[in-house]
Image: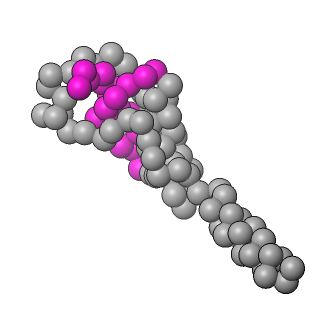
Amino acid sequence: MLRLLIALLCCCTLSACVSSDEPQLYHRINEAYDFEVTHCDSFAMVTGIGRGEFALRDAKLNAKKHGEELNGTHIVWSQVDHGDPTRVVAVIYKCLQ
């Protein structure tokens, strides 16, 4: 019974570490350069805004989420403004693979 309780506590502790407020690392949209998407269709521009210590990361995540909602496959960064707030602009592409 004690072993079961210890195993249960370990599992709860590990799951608490996994479910933090950090953003997910996996995205359905791929970052690319212009030359990598020459065979693709560009169909939208998205923007992202971030503030605070991780402003650039948050702005890019914000733009990626918009691109994913539009079912884009690739994102190419076209402008980064490091002001307050930090803003990014990107072009969304759909590539047939």
Q: Locate residue 54, reporting x and y percent.
A: 51, 58
In the picture as drawn, the residue positioned furthest to the bottom comes out as: 2
Residue 1: image location, x then y, percent: 86, 79
Which quadrant holds residue 64? Answer: top left
Q: Main secondary structure of the magenta part?
A: strand
Total marks in image: 0
Q: How is the image coloured?
A: one colour
| Residue at x 66% of width, y 58% of height | 19
Q: Residue furthest right?
A: 1
Residue 74 is left or right of residue 88, and the answer is left
Residue at position x 31%, y 32% from top? 74
* Drawn side of residue 54 relative to residue 31, left or right: right
Q: Is residue 86 visible?
A: no
Q: Is residue 52 above or below residue 45?
A: below
Name the residue at 33% across, 33% down.
Answer: 75
Q: In screen coordinates, is 5 left or right of 10?
A: right
The residue closer to the viewer here, 83 or 65, is 65
Give residue 89's position: percent from left, percent from top: 38, 33
Instruction: Please provide the residue range marked out in magenta.
Output: 70-97
Give the residue displayed 71% in from the left and 65% down from the top. 16
37 in relation to 26, above or below: above
**Percent x, y for residue 15?**
68, 63
Considering every residue shown, the one lying at the far front of the view is: 1
Nearest to the observer: residue 53 or residue 93 = 93
Residue 97 seen: yes
User: Image quadrant of residue 22?
Assistant: bottom right
Quarter of the image where the C terminus is located: top left
The magenta stretch spans residue 20: no
